[in-house]
Amino acid sequence: MSDIAVRDDRNPLLTPRDLKPGREGWEIVGVLNPGVFVFEGKVGLVLRVAERPPQSQGAITIAYRVGGERSESGVCLRSFDLDDPLLDATDPRVITYDGVTYLTSISDLRLAWSYDGRVFSVEPTPAIEAGAGSEAYGLEDARITRIDDSYHLTYSAVGPAGVSVGHATTTDWRQFTRHGSILPPPNKDVTMFPGTVSGVYRLLHRPSDPEFGGINMWIAESPDLEHWGNHRFLAAPRPGLWDSVRIGAGGPPIKTDEGWIVIYHGADEPNRYCFGAMLLDLKEPSIMRARSSEPIMEPQESYERVGFFGECVFTNGQVVHEEEVVLYYGASDTVVCRATVSMSDIFDSLE
Ligand code: MAN
């Protein structure tokens, strides 16, 4: 089966080999899931760069941040024997030891820049680096929304207390103001609407109760982009379809005459990640009008099927040129790719 996305013939645009790890001897396991923006005529990406410490035979070594000030924080390394019965290392992304879950890599957020949207140069150090405590396991999957002259970054902060949502702003991509956590665990996949809708700011989010209710998308409102309330359920996974287990928003909602187009990811029981679209009401975006029955994009190419976490395409940013949507996406949690989809094909996918 083929999907409606046209892949760039330069794919993958960025691979771990294009970057140097932040620490001597460490390995970059993935450069993935970029937030996307346009600034001074250039396309910018906020890359998630996932690194892991040196490994030894028969064991798995993980790292997490400890210490005080963010820039000075060190890391703590822990090694577990692969044959230890208390260890579950079946998912390459996480391990569980004696009931406690750790990530197998730590991610920071780095910037990459391009004049043509296809050839990128990556900054050597993180723009936003994880700290200790609630960020100890890393920062992931930034979404970027421009509102007036400010760019709003919303990202997952992962730590021993769970996955929460961080918020930072910038106007020049050099100085960042960090606003702390805007939604507590368990929550992720937050993307802001580009301005107010019917007089209030809005965002999409993905709380997930592991015991009850499913892994659903919600919508919230704010008078000031800081205080979020009036949370409402928006959409759930659909049993039997490509998005049967979990869903979460991609890049910022795209305004059209017919309503807001939201590109979102969905995963099924075997953990295969695809993405599709939803149409939300123009004036009251808590009302979903339509949704793709088939994915807009699904893992097909070898770089989407094989890697650190295979069978995965994941988008959290796009650039819209009227009829054409340029999607940037992580493939196999390893590389950054680009594809285009026409707006009319997106509308045709909706039911
Ligand atoms: C989660 C997040 C993403 C990742 C997918 C697939 O949703 O950790 O960053 O791309 O899983 O592994």
Image: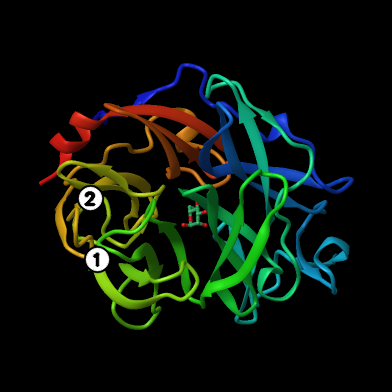
Residue ID at (87%, 45%): 25
From the viewer's perspective, is residue 286 above or below residue 260? below
Image coords of residue 276 (percent x, y): 28, 45
From the viewer's perspective, is residue 227 above or below residue 332? below
Q: CA distance from mark 1 to mark 2?
A: 12 Å
Residue at disc 1, secondary structure: loop
Q: Residue furthest left?
A: 351
The reply to whether callout 1 and callout 2 are in contact (CB within 8 Å) is no
From the viewer's perspective, is residue 102 above or below residue 313? below
Residue bearing mark 1: 236
Nearest the camera: 240 or 202?
Answer: 202
Q: Indicate the quadrant containing the N terminus: top left, top right, bottom left or bottom right.
A: top left
- Callout 1: 10 Å neighbours few (<14), some, many (20+)? some
Residue 178: which quarter of the image? Answer: bottom right
- Callout 2: 10 Å neighbours few (<14), some, many (20+)? many
Residue bearing mark 2: 278
Residue ID at (61%, 80%): 161
Residue type of the residue flagged with mark 2? Met
Residue ID at (78%, 67%): 65
Nearest the camera: 209 or 290?
Answer: 290
Residue type of the residue flagged with mark 1? Ala
